[in-house]
Amino acid sequence: MFKKFASYYVPHLRLFAADMTCAFLSSMCNMFYPIVTRSIINVYIPERRLSALAGWTAALFGVYVFKAGLNYFIQYYGHVMGVLITMDMRRDAFDHLQRLPFAFFDKTKTGTLMSRIINDTFEIAELSHHGPEDLFLSLAMLMGAFVVLCTMNVNLTLIIFVLIPLLLWFASLMRRRLSRASMKTRVEIGEVNADLANSIDGVRVSKAFETSGHELDKFQSGNKAYAHARGQQYRAMAEFFSGTGFILDLLLLVTLSSGGFFAYYGKINAGEFAAYLLFVGLFTEPIKRLINFVEQLQNGMTGFVRLQELMAAEPEKDEPGAQELTEVRGDVSFEHVTFRYDDGKSNKTVLSDLCLDIHKGETVALVGPSGGGKSTLCHLLPRFYELDAGRITLDGTDIRRYTRLTLRRKVGIVQQETFLFSGSVRDNIAYGNVDATDEEIEAAAARASLDEFIRALPDGYDTYVGERGVMLSGGQKQRIAIARVFLKNPRILILDEATSALDNITEAQIQKALNELSQGRTTLVVAHRLSTVRHAHRIVVLTDAGIAEQGRHEELLALAPNGLYAALWNSQKMGE
């Protein structure tokens, strides 16, 4: 774990070395004051050497000016280094997040992920800057102060150092309690963030059903759990700091009393005694740094451990020797496909030994009761999930022989719930091809019957759509999703209930754009409204038992009164 943490310093070694050098020189500057104090009390004042007194005063002033410059560098560039290291960690975490499979996000809360990438890395930034600095300087100053104190009075120094093992034992004992409390706090704040993100996303639902009080109760429950965990952490911190503070005060008391006895019996003079007290003050500073380091280490490493847990999640991997997919005809075959969702509970099989062939340029509609695996089948083609058995081929080749990146570039998807990113209309259409020119984006919008509407907006293509596209209607968002796919220009198209959430008039308009989009492409359509797929080349009725029927619209209707499709069709016609 520490080796992995240290690897993030490698790109910033020069800045790290400069920071440590400045910190070391700054600590050395503190050594001048006790030494000069001893000389002033023992020599310059008794011998009335005013010029020497003034000279050393000026020298100390110069040292402190130099120290101020060093501290400026430490505070500014040291923290910048911590931010850069944290930025690298967040970059790696986000990049890893982008490569995780759908199954990971099915089981993980968004707020928890945000907490790990944002909140936890803040503590890591503090540790990455202050941790090595405090540890290195504390050890250096302890050794330096010990050597100087021994030159002044060995016996007194040994008496003082008897308390150091007691301090180290207490710090080690309390470190474990701090670690457990810190981890519990991190877990609870992740849950609070998750509940908050969920409540904000669903604020329109809670307003519509007047359940804001219920949402507040849910949030407050998590908030109280976090407050309790934070209280336990602060209790551990209070015990740690009060205990170490008492031992440090005891150290000063032992120094004062022992030094007083030594001075009384003439074992140490007044100047050395004053200098000794000042050096012990310097001696306690690195100990305090070490105490602070323990707290930083617990907070920072707890955050780093949680970040590494995220990084340990298995990303999507291509098969050894996977090749890029270049040319696509569009023949798709599902051969004895079996799949179940790994939800940690039921692990119910969704598809079992399913076989289905789709020819290039053919539009195949998937219909049937909910839970039959229609959307799942569509998600398996671009390898959002991995099969439990069987295989899927594209133009006769197992899709696992292609890289996921190039496979997904050849597949376009329009879903029922269109997700728009915060940004402009242009930005969202450009997700179909981030390298597209403005002319290509506008051409795609025109093919989706969207160009005229966009140009009527206050800022045209640069109009802000709001978070998740809340500034647009459902039909407008759906057209943007269609424009994306026009811009992507895939050979294989998946329409997963792309119009089921729209009214009849808007659906008819969108359906026209979808019909144009599917021309010449191998198209897989999931639909509940059978009227939208009656002209498909083939309709497949999929149930939880597998494929029940397949054929053209007229052929399936001819199976009445016992046909499942005919029953669904007649039921919908009666409802209309």
Image: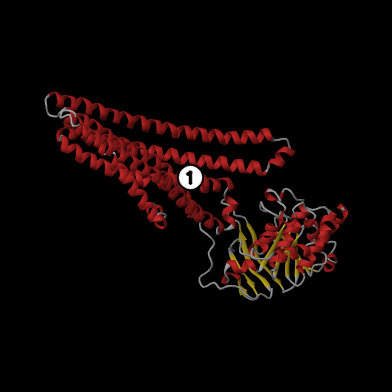
Report x, y in % for residue 426.
70, 58
Report x, y in % for residue 278.
25, 32
Q: Quadrant of residue 245?
A: top left
Q: Quadrant of residue 557?
A: bottom right
Question: Which of these two is toward me, 133 or 342?
Answer: 133
State left or right for residue 17 relative to residue 445.
Answer: left
Q: Residue furthest left?
A: 266
Q: Residue furthest top?
A: 264
Question: Which of these two is toward me, 245 or 461?
Answer: 461
Q: Is residue 350 visible?
A: yes
Report x, y in % for residue 241.
37, 32
Q: Is residue 160 above or below residue 373?
A: above
Question: Which of these two is toward me, 256 or 519?
Answer: 256
- Picture residue at 69% right of the left edge, 62% below the top: 413
Task: Please state which amino acid type lies under the numbered disc 1.
Answer: Phe
Q: Is residue 510 above or below residue 330?
A: above
Q: Residues within 10 Å of mark 1 (few under 14, many from 20)?
A: some
- Picture residue at 51% right of the left edge, 44% below the top: 119
- Picture residue at 57% right of the left edge, 45% below the top: 111
Q: Identify the residue under disc 1.
A: 122
